[in-house]
Image (cartoon, rainbow, N blue to C red):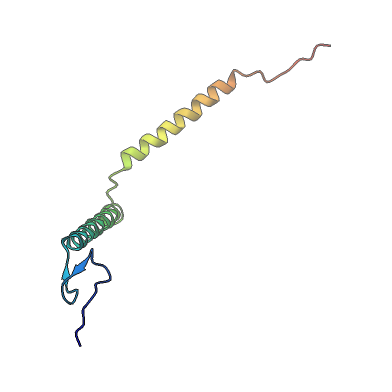
Amino acid sequence: MSWSCICLTPSLYYGNYCEIQTSALKVKQALSRSFAGVAIAALVLTCSFVIIMDVLKYVFKIDPVKAERLKQIQAKKAVKSKAKAKAANVAVRFQYVA
């Protein structure tokens, strides 16, 4: 009338009742917790940054990226004006010779 416990995953648990975790399982659990912590921290920082930028712009009327936006607009205008200047050199009138 004796019995024995056979662990289904002996690489993760061992002992008479499979109650003891192996060091490999403990390492995997610690790594998964640390990766989850890093992911949560990254999400919180990203959301905080977006909220802070919105508060600065819409509550305090401070636009931290206004100078960069103006530079981009000026660069686009410069490209358009160069395209117009090049278009002026194109022949508008054609003369057909038979």
Residue at far top of view? 98
Image vertical order of residue 50 relative to residue 5, above or below: above
Q: Nearer the viewer, residue 81 or 15?
A: 15
What is the x, y in percent for residue 81?
50, 27
- Judged left or right of residue 63, residue 92 is right
Report which quarter residue 52 is drawn in.
bottom left
Residue at far front of view? 1
Image vertical order of residue 96 relative to residue 63, above or below: above
Q: Nearer the viewer, residue 86 or 26?
A: 26
Name the residue located 22 percent from the left edge and 77 percent from the top edge: 5
- Judged left or right of residue 56, residue 97 is right
Name the residue located 45 percent from the left edge and 28 percent from the top edge: 78
What is the x, y in percent for residue 17?
18, 77
Total residue callouts:
0
Q: Which of 43 and 16 is in front in this view?
A: 16
Name the residue located 84 percent from the left edge and 11 percent from the top edge: 98
Report which quarter residue 20 is drawn in.
bottom left
Image vertical order of residue 25 relative to residue 17, above or below: above
| Quadrant where the N terminus is found in the figure | bottom left
What is the x, y in percent for residue 66?
32, 42
Residue at far bottom of view? 1
Residue at far right of view? 98
Report which quarter residue 40 is drawn in.
bottom left
Name the residue located 29 percent from the left edge and 47 percent from the top edge: 63
What is the x, y in percent for residue 82?
50, 24
